[in-house]
Image: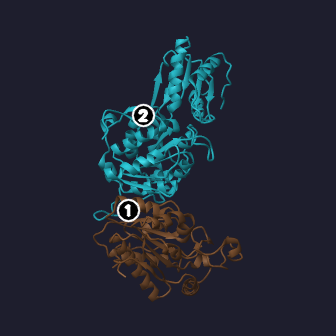
Chain colours: A brown, B cyan
Amino acid sequence: MARLLRATRTTYCPGCSHGLIHRLLAEALGEFTHHPIIGVNSVGCSVVIYEYLAVDFVQAPHGRAPAVATGVKRMRPDSIVFTYQGDGDALAIGMGELIHAAARGENITVIFVNNGVYGMTGGQLAPTTLPGQKTTTTPWGRKESESGFPIDACSLLRSIPGVAYLARSSVHDLKSVHAARRYMSRAFHTQARGLGFSFVEVLAACPTNWKLDPTLAIKRVGTELVRYFPPGEFVAKEGSGL
Amino acid sequence: MMAGRVLLSGNHVVAESAIRAGCTFFAGYPITPQSEIVEYMATHLPARQGVFIQAESELAACAMVYGAAATGHLAMTASSGPGFTLLQEGISYLAAAELPALIVDVMRCGAGLGTIDPAQSDYLQATKGGGHGDYRCLVYAPANHNEASYLTFLAFQKAVQYRNPVILLLDGALGQMMESVSLASWECVGAGIDPRAIAAYALDGALDRPPRRLGMTVYVNPHFTAGLREKFEVMRRAERRCEAYLTGDAEVVLVAYGITARVARETVRMARQTGVRGGLFRPISLWPFPYEELCEHARHASSIVVVEMSFGQMVEDVLTAVRKQGPPVTLFCSPEGVIPQSTALLDFVRASLRGETDEVKP
């Protein structure tokens, strides 16, 4: 099924959700056997996604993945074009590019992995860090009075007419994993039908920077993260397969 | 379709020439004094099989150009001053991923927001690597509209040949002024774009070949860094361009590029009428700077006058060129957004020959 997944072990930390999400992504993309596929990898732990997914990749500057994907898609409109971005990349340094790609109704798919922390740089505050959560730059926990509130990407994108498909799932149990897989598939079918911007948020675990055992980390995804960022399908334009 | 001589602004010359050269993607952000390039592309590119996007910022514009370039299309953006700063991120990524693109900077005055008046104050940023990391870009500086058209074609050719971004450096005066121009063609340049060169890197979705990766963390690969360094050395040796005017017997050599070179040329002509043997050395490639050529053309001179619309940026390259054994270097600068007058420059040239101007030292 996952013919686009390379037969290799990932170098992600034990309990990291990227490996699982890569597999779901490879399966969803694998449905498009006759489509050219071009990925845009972003800055963060998942920068090495090209080691695991056997498709063309171009590496974006930090935060600019939706803009890079825009250039790719406009010149290769017959291709499935996606970005794979973390929370710092998409919602901090790349918020402008994300919102404007959505506003243009750019016919690309953004896979947005939200684990509430900067992973690659060692566990700093992210735009999605939960209130009270300790990070290396909020050593006493995130205080709303100082570093503000977590950003809910789906609520933000929901108001934008260019968004054709918008969904969020976690990957903390079998049911949510299947939902994430289904949402990715629908997002790519939305793109293949030329309906506009599609966005799938995946709530994910980062045991290393959360300083939690992998089993406790994935449990936290299913409780705290799901509570703050409720999963579901929020936008599905007619024809997107919902 | 325009044919023969036409009257166009420098901005329109660059935009129209880029389309004729085969540019099919433009992303940009409005900023004075280059907005006419964005507007021209918005009006003309879609009708000629191209894609135009008004980006949300110059950061995004250059990222879009990077994405389009990755698919094997000729892509460009244009900006000025503050926007040129934001383009640097993407330029660095283009260089690292070895992707061709044309970057146009229609220079305006000052640091910070500065003003919208013409200037030459982005010389250092353009020629010394305005973005992060180890890379170089060819930088071409036209002095008139015919040359701007020619260099636009040449820039695309060199960008593909070296798989590297090329910068076209205009100033606000050249961008805005109307001039009679014969637009260039690929015949003028001698060779067009080799599609095989593009096919070697372009991403097309990999249906019938192994997947490719562009712009990965390749700097850890010694073969890649050695290859990149060698490429920049080849560019440094092979791509120097300049023009000399009456330097053969010149006692004073003026060094200027772009719009100021036109004033300097007029000044040389006026000087000659009054018995002062002036000459003009005009770098066309600002990187690589024609160091050896300048030394050769200034070998009989007792004075070198650098003319710049900045506090003095190119003068550092002139000092590097002539080193200790060359004639004294002086600087006539006009940094406040005003094109210098040839009469004022002539007075300065005469003063330099009398040793009354301050020598610029490293």
Q: Which residue is mark 2?
A: B145
- Amino acid bearing label 1: Lys
What quarter of the picture does the C terminus of chain B occupy? Answer: top right
User: Horizontal and vertical percent for residue B62?
Assistant: 47, 54
Alpha carbon distance from label 1 to label 2: 34 Å
Which quarter of the figure has residue A80? bottom left
The answer to whether residue B326 is visible is: no
> Are labels 1 and 2 assigned to the same chain?
no
Image-based side of A154 in relation to B22, left or right: right
Circle 2: is it few (<14), some (14-19), or many (20+) Cα within 10 Å?
A: many
Give the quadrant of the N terminus of chain B: top left
Residue B116 in the image: x percent, y percent? 57, 42
Badge 1: chain ID = A
Residue B10 vs B272, above or below: the answer is below
Mark 1 — residue? A73
The count of marks equals 2
Q: Looking at the image, which residue is at 64% across and 19% down?
A: B352
Q: Of helix, strand and loop, which one carries label 1?
A: helix
- Give the amino acid at mark 2: His
Q: Nearer the viewer, residue B356 or A19?
A: B356
Q: Is residue A200 above or below residue B266?
A: below
- State the residue in front, A5 or A196: A196
Q: Write the residue at 33% across / 77% down.
A: A239
Judged from this view, the residue extending furthest toward the top is B275
Residue at 47% x, 32% y: name it: B143
Q: Nearer the viewer, residue B170 or B337?
A: B337
